[in-house]
Image: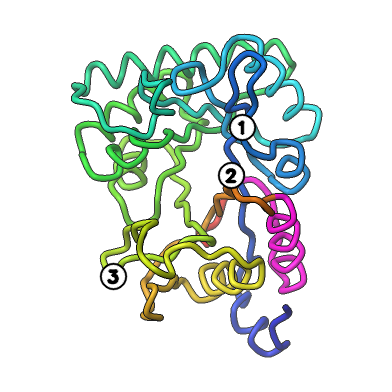
Amino acid sequence: MTRNGSERERTTAGQRLAVDLNCDFGEGFGPYAFGHDDGLLEQATSVNIACGFHAGDPHTMRQAVERAVSAGAAVGAHPGLPDRLGFGRREMAVTPDEVYDFVVYQIGALDAFVRAAGGTLHHVKPHGALYHMAGADEAIAEAVVRAAAVFGSHLFVYGQSGTLLPVVAERCGLTAVSEVFADRAYRPDGRLADRRTPGALLERPEQILRQALAMVLEGRAYTPDGSAVPVRAQTICLHGDGRDAAYAAQYLRRGLQEAGIAVEPPRRNFAPG
């Protein structure tokens, strides 16, 4: 799992290497739960809490916020499209103004629960189809960033490495955090490989750790055929829908730390990965 000493010294020369581990959290509704919240919360340093559109309701939001604050995780809003039936994973024909309104509404709801729990909202990460739309459409990205800015310039904006959302966030004066996916193979253009492509899903913990180390230490991910793709790894998404998600997250965090990489949420003096 560990890197040799000389490689670690070359990698960390001049700065301390750190990466955030984020997970989607509280994506249930009423009595229904999704994913492995408890196991992931033990390993994640930041959480993205569903705000009521694609998942979540006032009760699950309050409970998720209280658990995250108690665990010491950085709490972020996870706004999605108003498509509970499709779990927010289907694109919709929405205007930038509609996106702005959707996102302000959802951040505002979660921010109220965070304040009530004695915490401070840390970041915004769009969910599902909205995440991908904001990464590819500049007007949608600007709508998401404008909505986040309403709640203060201290908020980080999480967006996929190499897409428009981090670029637009920085241009608008917010701090972007570039996200990577250690359990997914990439396409040569930097987008995620289709889940139906053979080799697109990395399921074994050692595979996930191997790619995570390459992302953080070398700035590269891989395609299903093994070709390298440049990425900027500041936060790694922990998916909660795999059968062994909690164990894989634990294995990943331990492996990163053994390689000399600090695991912590982004802060104001956050350095690029």
Which residue was labeled with disc 2?
241
Provide residue 85's location: percent of width, then percent of height.
41, 22
Q: Is residue 266 visible?
A: no
Residue 100 tag number: none
| Quarter of the picture holding the N terminus | bottom right
Q: What's the magenta region? A: 246-265
> Viewer-nearest of labels 2 and 3?
2
Q: CA distance from mark 2 to mark 3?
A: 26 Å
- 249 part of magenta stretch: yes
Instruction: Indicate the position of residue 212 as horizontal and vertical percent values.
Output: 57, 67
Query: Mark 2 or mark 3: which comes first in sequence?
Result: 3
- Residue depicted at 45% across the width and 52% down the height: 178
Is 111 placed above or below 18 here? Answer: above
Q: As rendered, which of 31 and 268 lies closer to the eye?
A: 31
Viewer-proximal residue among 20 and 199: 199
Q: Is residue 248 magenta?
A: yes
Q: Residue at x 32, y 35 (%)?
A: 172
Mark 1 touches mark 2? (CB < 8 Å): yes
> Disc 2 on helix, strand or loop?
loop
Which is more N-terminal, label 3 or label 1? 1
Amino acid type at circle 3 is Pro
Q: Amino acid at mark 2?
A: Asp
Q: What type of secondary structure mainly makes up the magenta span?
A: helix
Can residue 179 be spotted in the picture? yes
Q: Which residue is mark 3?
A: 188
**Mark 1: few/some/many CA within 10 Å (<14, 14-19, 20+):** some
Give the residue drawn at x 61%, y 77%: 13
Mark nearest the camera among 1 and 3 is: 1
Going from N to C along the chain, the mark reached first, 1 or 2, is 1
Residue 34 bears which disc, if any? 1
